[in-house]
Image (spheres, rainbow, N blue to C red):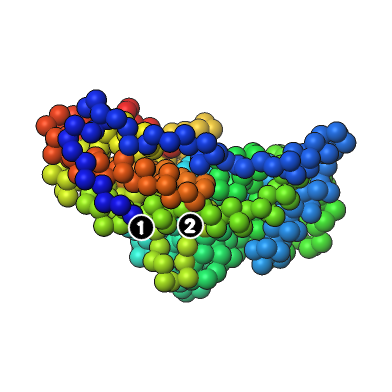
Amino acid sequence: MNQFNETLENLALLGGNKAVQTDQKDMFKWPIITEEHEKAVLDVLRSGNMSGIDITKQFEAKYAYNLGRKYALGCHNGTAAITGAMFGLGVGAGDEVIAPAITYWASILQAMNLGATPVFSDVDPYSLCIDPKDIERKITDRTKIIVVVHYSAMPADMDAIMVISNKYNIKVLEDCSHAHGTLYKGKEAGTFGAAAAFSLMSGKAFAIGEAGIMLTDDRKVYERAILFGHYIRHNEITIDEVKKYAGLPCGGVKHRMQQLNSALGLVQLKYYPDQMNEINQAMNYFCDAMENTPGVKPIRPSKDAGTSKGGWYFPLFHYKADQLGGLSLKRFTQAVRAEGTMCNPGSNHPLHLHPLFRNMDVYGHGRPTRIAQLPPGTEIDKYLESLPVSEKVFKQVFQVPWFKKYRPEIIDQHVRAYKKVIQNYKILLKEDSQENRDWIPGGYSSFFTD
């Protein structure tokens, strides 16, 4: 990697040339669609078999086999997959469900629809995943499950989490929507908990359209998920306590995966390992080049731990303003973007501060929906508390380019973009302001005014 010694006049924000000049072509194109993908989808379309389940069952079986799990259930999106997993695990009225504050709402909001109360845990300041130490502080006799999100493809501390799970006999649901192919000490994300759920929508690392999938080794969890949202498959139910309700639309919803997505998924399972490996190589090349650069720090696992970020969905860096004279994240990202590369400030906003989880009465219960199924007299204040890491860390991270191809000569230009800005941070300070420093970045789950 070359060392870039840029001068003040070169900053694109101040009228210089952009660092990234080469046509990007397919560096960021995703998903990568081949003629084989197209043929598989057209075959389903032309046969009129979009709402069947035969191809979906093939996709489920192969996905489960690849992950080493017994059962998989294709759903129309990741939100539905998580809902089915929660219902499958028995989440219901009066329960509490622990989840990280830094995540998308679809990791936890469904608990409220099932009558349960979300309880938010703080996150680890480096990984941004749920903090095991805070999980244990949040456990009560109402705690039903723990939702673990492998955030930004970074694997959570599953050793510590599973110790807590076993100690209190509380099951874990892994939300792996960011973590396709992610490894934790040689074991794949989605294989630790009693159930796991993946979003497979077109923006994710394993992308097959608007779809999701739930996995488990527990037949009862699988059958309850079928009972809730897959009434066309109730003939698969064999367990007596579940079977007595078979034939009824118990959840009043239809979670079935469309077979255009299933067909695409079957082909993508063939191509994804090689695609993921190339993404991993490209992203680690970029991170290696940036590793010892002042002001920024890649969020990634240690290379020697048998742990990896798989497809690297939503790659994030920490921003260290103190190493750049206090330069605001807003000013920094403006300058980097001007160089022709991605630099999106922020992450998901902390959910525990969101009005939806503090005071909203969504369904007319006469009190906040979050506590609607708890005993009369329960006050929402009991569930409102400070989570200090979550309340600041989302303002101290930024998203970097998500390279889909390993092409060092192009990646080097993006490295140059960042290093130009960092090496010339002092001039940017002259145009910075307190308003910039007080600015709150937007992002998913955002409810602040940008």
Q: Residue at x 81, y 51 (%)?
A: 234
Residue in the foreground of this view, choosing between 182 and 110: 182
Neighbor class of circle 2 (other Cα within 10 Å; few <14, some 14-19, many 20+) is some
Question: Residue type at mark 2?
Answer: Gln
Give the residue furthest to the right.
Answer: 47
Q: Quadrant of residue 255?
A: top right
Q: Residue at x 39, y 66 (%)?
A: 302
Secondary structure of the residue carrying numbered label 2: helix
Say left or right for 249 vs 14.
Answer: right
- The relative height of residue 73 versus residue 192 in the rendered view (above or below) is above
Quadrant of the rendering where the C terminus is positioned: top left
How far, Cα to Cα, is label 2 from label 1? 10 Å
Q: Quadrant of residue 30?
A: top right
Q: Quadrant of residue 159?
A: bottom left
Q: Which mark is residue 288?
A: 1
Q: Which mark is residue 281?
A: 2
Residue 440 in view, yes or no: no
Measured from the top left, where is residue 194 in percent x and y?
Answer: 60, 64
Say left or right for 303 vs 197.
Answer: left
Residue in the foreground of this view, choosing between 11 and 361: 11
- The relative height of residue 362 versus residue 281 in the rendered view (above or below) is above
Measured from the top left, where is residue 370 in percent x and y?
Answer: 46, 43
